[in-house]
Image (cartoon, helix red, strand yellow):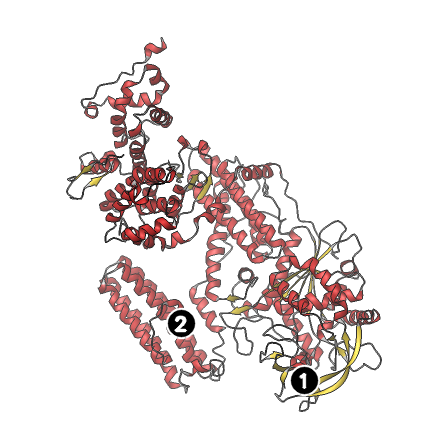
Amino acid sequence: MFQIILIPECGKNTLPIQGFSTIIQALVASSKCSNMLCSEKEVQALTQQWLEYVTVCVNHADLPVNAKRVFNELNTVLKDVTYITGTEKTIADVTLYYVLHSIMKELSGQEKIQYIHLSRWFDNIQQEEKLRQDLDLISFNLLHIFL
Amino acid sequence: MIISTNENNPNALKLIIAAKLIQKTFIVKVVKSGDAVLGRLPTLTVSSGLSLFSVSSALRLLLPISKELEVLNNRWLEWEISQLQPTILSYTSARTPKILQKSDLWSLLKDLNSELKNKQYLIEEHSNLSPAFILSPADISIWVSLWSTILLPDIRNDISKDLSNVNNWLINIEKQPVIQISPTKEKEMETVSQEELHNVEKSWTTGQYPEVKENSYPILPKKGERNILVTSALPYVNNVPHLGNIIGCVLSADIFARYCRQRNYNTLYISGTDEYGTATEAKALQEKTTPQVICDKFFDIHNDVYRWFGIGFDYFGRTTTPEQTEIVQAFFLRIKSQGYVSSETVEQLHCESCDRFLADRFVEGTCPRCKYEDARGDQCDGCSHLVNAVELINPRCKMCNTRPVIKNSIQFFLDLPKIEKRLKEYSITVEKEWSSVARAVSKSWLRDGLKPRCITRDLKWGIPVPIEGFENKVFYVWFDAPFGYISITKRYTKEYKKWWQPLQDTKIDLCQFMAKDNVPFHAIMFPAYLLAANQNYTLIKYLMATEYLNYEDKKFSKSRGIGVFGTDARDTGIPADVWRFYLAYIRPETQDSNFNWVDLATKNNSELLNNLGNFVNRALVFSEKFFNSTVPPIEAEEADWTVLALAQRELSCYINAMEQAKLRDGLKYILAISKHGNQYMQFQQPWVKVKGTDDNKKRAGTVIAICCNLACLLSALLAPFMPSTAKQLRSQLGLSNKSYGYIPETITNMLPTWHKIGKPNPLFTKIEDQKIEMLRKKYDGQQETNNGISANKVSDESITLEAAITKQGNLVRELKAKRDKSIWQPQVEILLDLKKKLNDLKNNVNTSEKKLPAKNKKVEPIHAPEQNGDALTDVMALEMAIAKQGNLVRELKAKEDGSIWKPQVEILLEMKQRLMDLTGTAPVVVDKKSKKKK
């Protein structure tokens, strides 16, 4: 039912690391951008919360009914903040971007407007080329809908 | 912190456990999931405003984990939420339950089992901060998920059979103290419903706060109002009252009466000394003076003691008054005319060697009912039944120990069997409201059936029997004493009949306070007299009896100098209000309780100083500092209504408890209010907000105003217990200290906006350990020995030394924690030197003074206290020191390595050896508890 990801050689320790968000955190911690986890305790807690959210909710958003709830929730949260944890970009934003990309791509213009805060956030994140790598830029040029 | 959850959400339990482990205060709010952000519950909201719906993240925030173990902890937290929870859900909701061993759940449990191989916990030694942190987020989370869902007995059986690692892990977790306290109870206590919030908001905005009405002399009952007549058992005059007597009657009655006055009931509190009887007569003989002189002397002693304790009698009288004689004689004639008195020739005990009839109290013997050997002539302490002196087996004269002979004499008897039926009818209507010990005693009396009671005696010091031919006899003290309540009321006002024989439409509640030994006289005898008189006298409605108070696990004993008597309390330098507080706190309401010095200091320092005093002082100081000593305007939000609703809940409980004279509970509810206040203030952080934006400042103002109002409420609630403290607090609040403030049923806005407060000052002071130790020794009865002076000197010296040792010990501990050895080593030398001196001092005492081998203490602890007093002190001091050292060693072993704790172990062993030398018993390996009790 669940796919468990094993990465035996992560970092210097030899113990295998399991679990989607655990692996991400471990990777970030041992990478050059360990600041993406944020050292401030409360932001770190929020980051972990959203990574967990990705694991238990967004990863199941391939079903339309789940997707709807996830979009609604993210849209609510992003109404007031720039990044998912507040004012700093963290690994949670990056992870969300990647798991959402394939679903966001399918959204109609109308839907993008419906989840306008989520769209604004997504568009902001995907502008960074280093982060986007070879994923397609999704168009959020929604002006034509209002015309 | 606030934990918001919906009903029965086990995930909230995880947060509660973590919050308790780190000892953070928190409030649990039950909300509907629709009201939560994203509809996900539970959430944890911390003081910065951050709110988390992920339980794992919240747990990690509360319980930080060392870096190396973070990955492991994350992995199992993720496993719990992404695998365990969904699997449990599908297992438990499956329509046809699968065989456990073939389910997905079982394979997950097997994973857990292999992870736990050779491990006590999933995440071990993850924090070196404190043993409280032994449970990691992962352990808590997984345990709660399993325990709250599938750990039914049969599944547990399967686990213990096949998954021994998981089984051991479950046992390890379940023996943690934090798991053993039932969290559900706490949850119920702390959750506030919307209705409560609504109610408190309504009473706050619309309710009026009434004044306490002023009473003018004389206080009389009024038609249609609540009229309370409070009495405390009349203390017998030739005893100096001790702490147990004080809390047993006068102080309890005083607290209750003060409460009633602050509720605007018409309240009259009377008491006085009971002065007639043989004991006084005998004492007068002994001191070669008249009984009246003895009575006058002791009346003053009692009066002084009670005045110092702040007992607010409306009238404190005595029984040797013309009013008493007149009332008792009139009652006797009335009861006789109603046909309830008969005369009979009785056999009475006469002591040939003292040449007198022996009063009941002057005979001792074996109780005919329970065979208790030291039964008194009037009552048996073993079974608390009344005894007829001539029925005692093997009677002996208490004065000269010879066996008295039986002589004949004509006496009057009260025909109790004749009144029994009416007494029973009456008893059924009132006893529901009595304290349990009162109910038990009166029930057993009526069940056994009543017998005629002799009410006259062949004595001189008493009220003469007004019948020809009986001039040489007086009334039995227990016939005359209860009428003291009436005669003392008459001394207070000529209109005393309004209290005792009220008009039909005026209702009087007579509340009588006493210790349990007085119950038969108030539950049976006194009502019997009044019913027999048949003139509509006010009968007892509430009988508030207490059990006994012990002193440091011993009985109070004036002759052996054990305990705090009379004016001793004043000499301790501890304020009367603190005594009142502590005595009420340990009031023996449902069982015998125990006075303990260390406990007194702890309660003073933790409850009064840190809880109550801290709260009101902070509230007032903030008002003084930031709002120019005024009460700022209130713009209340939910958090403010919540604290008021919590306080309202405690207030209702307080009223409920106090109405039933459950004073101990009443006091606890007061402390609960200030605890809520402290948490509220801690959470709202007005000291931060006051420096913020204008909105923040307003918020801070609201918080301070709410806290000042709570302080005002507390001043009223506290006043019955600690009147002079309450007055101080009221003047600090800028209120008139003419009255103590009305005790309301609902919380209202008591201090108007911009009300000017007074000058805040700390209400309580800390009681230091050394002082307590000194007092404990002083009243321990050990010094009144034959060689009292030298013993005193030695013990003074050793007290000074011990104090110095404690101080030095603290210094050393502090230094050890922070500095390196070169700095603390010299201090250790000093400490060791001091300890050696103390040892020498004690050894000197033991060798220089002739003494019995301390072993004797075990055999006859009571008969030889004088001779081995010092050895005894020594043994006790040693036992305490051993317990202390034992703790130190345990603590060190847990944290430090051998080089540090080994020397301490040596010391411990040496102490144990010395104890063995002293007591002659082998130092059994015992834990500290049983050691102390030995």
According to the picture, the residue beneath numbered tag 2 turns out to be B800
- State the image coordinates of residue B842 (x, y, percent, origin top left): 37, 79
**Measuring 21% from the left and 19% from the top, which residue is drawn there?**
A136
Query: In the figure, residue B82 lies in which quadrant?
Result: top left
Mark 2 and mark 1 residues within 8 Å of each other at the beta carbon = no
Provide residue B46's location: percent of width, then percent of height. Answer: 39, 40
Q: Is residue B623 left or right of residue B325?
A: left
Residue A3: where, in percent of width, then height?
A: 24, 34
**Amino acid type indicated by mark 2:** Thr
**Quadrant (top left/top right/bottom left/bottom right) for the C terminus of chain B:** bottom left
Name the side, left or right, on which B872 lies relative to B555.
Answer: left
The percent coordinates of residue B11 (x first, y second) are: 38, 41
Q: Is residue B297 visible?
A: yes
Indicate which disc, 2 or 1, sits on the residue closer to the N terminus. 1
Please give the residue where the numbered disc 1 appears in the rendered image: B285
In the image, residue B532 sits, relative to residue B101, either above or below, namely below
On whether disc 2 and disc 1 are found on a single subunit, the reply is yes
The numbered dot on residue B742 is: none
Mark 1, Cα crowd under 10 Å, few <14 / some 14-19 / many 20+, is few
Q: Is residue B802 left or right of residue B515?
A: left
Amino acid on which the number 1 mark rests in the picture: Leu
